[in-house]
Image (cartoon, grey):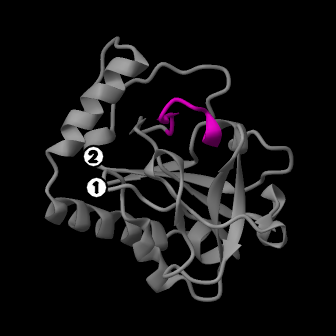
């Protein structure tokens, strides 16, 4: 674990260095362990609608959760201005298109928007997490704003590699903690 008094920018840089050292095999193994642990939770089993995300190469491959979805409805985030919206998708194979910051997002269709109150479980990426659920994102605040949405009742689980766990994060008023962090 990393810790101490550092700025968010310094911490983001240090985490990027640690993640760059992970081999594709390590990423695959750690991703599988994270998804297995997450899929064994009551929150996963009880959820009817799950918000996933399209992982970057330095994020856990939560696409593995498609294998254990059952009849769950799945939605993915899309950046719209300063906010995220989650859009329902029918399948992983052809649902996403390249967007800002090398993100993959579903195409925007009003009829596919999932209102915050309809999501039961939200799987959230981050640059760094603490074991008790504090999260630091990439710096734009998209997830923090979404997690503060009126009506959102979803359980929010953070997912990361153990290289992203830190002892302490600078926490600001708008930062929203995760119910649990899954790391491997």
Q: Residue at x 53, y 80 (%)?
A: 94
Q: Residue furthest top?
A: 5
Q: Mark 1 or 2 closer to N-term?
A: 2
Residue 182: give x, y in percent of width and height.
Answer: 41, 54
Q: Is residue 157 above or below residue 75?
A: above
Left or right of 95? Residue 101 is left
**In-front residue for pair 167/80:** 80
Residue 178: give x, y in percent of width and height.
Answer: 56, 44
Read off the residue under disc 2. Answer: 162
Q: Is residue 106 above or below residue 59?
A: below
Magenta highlight on residue 142: yes
Point out which mark residue 118 bears: none
Read off the residue under disc 1. Answer: 184
Span of residues in magenta: 133-143
Q: Which type of secondary structure does the marked residue at label 1 adopt?
A: loop
Within the image, what quadrant is residue 144 found in? top right
Q: Residue at x 23, y 43 (%)?
A: 19
Residue 47: give x, y in percent of width and height.
Answer: 67, 72
Within the image, what quadrant is residue 165 found in? top left
Label pair 1/2, CB-CB below 8 angstroms: yes
- Magenta-drawn stretch, dominant element (helix, strand or loop): loop
């Amino acid at each position: 674990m990393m810790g101490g008094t550092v700025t968010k920018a310094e911490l983001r840089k240090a985490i990027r260095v640690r993640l760059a050292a992970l081999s594709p095999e390590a990423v695959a193994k750690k991703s599988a362990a994270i998804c297995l642990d997450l899929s064994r939770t009551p929150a996963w089993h009880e959820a009817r609608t799950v918000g996933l995300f399209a992982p970057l190469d330095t994020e856990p491959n939560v696409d593995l959760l498609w294998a254990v979805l059952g009849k769950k409805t799945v939605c993915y985030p899309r950046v719209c201005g300063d906010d995220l919206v989650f859009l329902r998708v029918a399948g992983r194979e052809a649902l996403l298109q390249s967007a800002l910051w090398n993100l993959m997002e579903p195409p925007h269709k009003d009829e596919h928007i999932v209102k915050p109150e309809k999501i039961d479980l939200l799987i959230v990426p981050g640059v760094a997490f603490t074991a008790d659920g504090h999260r630091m994102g990439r710096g734009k605040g998209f997830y923090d704003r979404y997690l503060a949405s009126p009506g959102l009742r979803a359980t929010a689980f953070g997912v990361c590699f153990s290289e992203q766990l830190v002892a302490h994060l600078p926490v600001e008023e708008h930062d929203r903690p995760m119910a649990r962090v899954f790391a491997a």
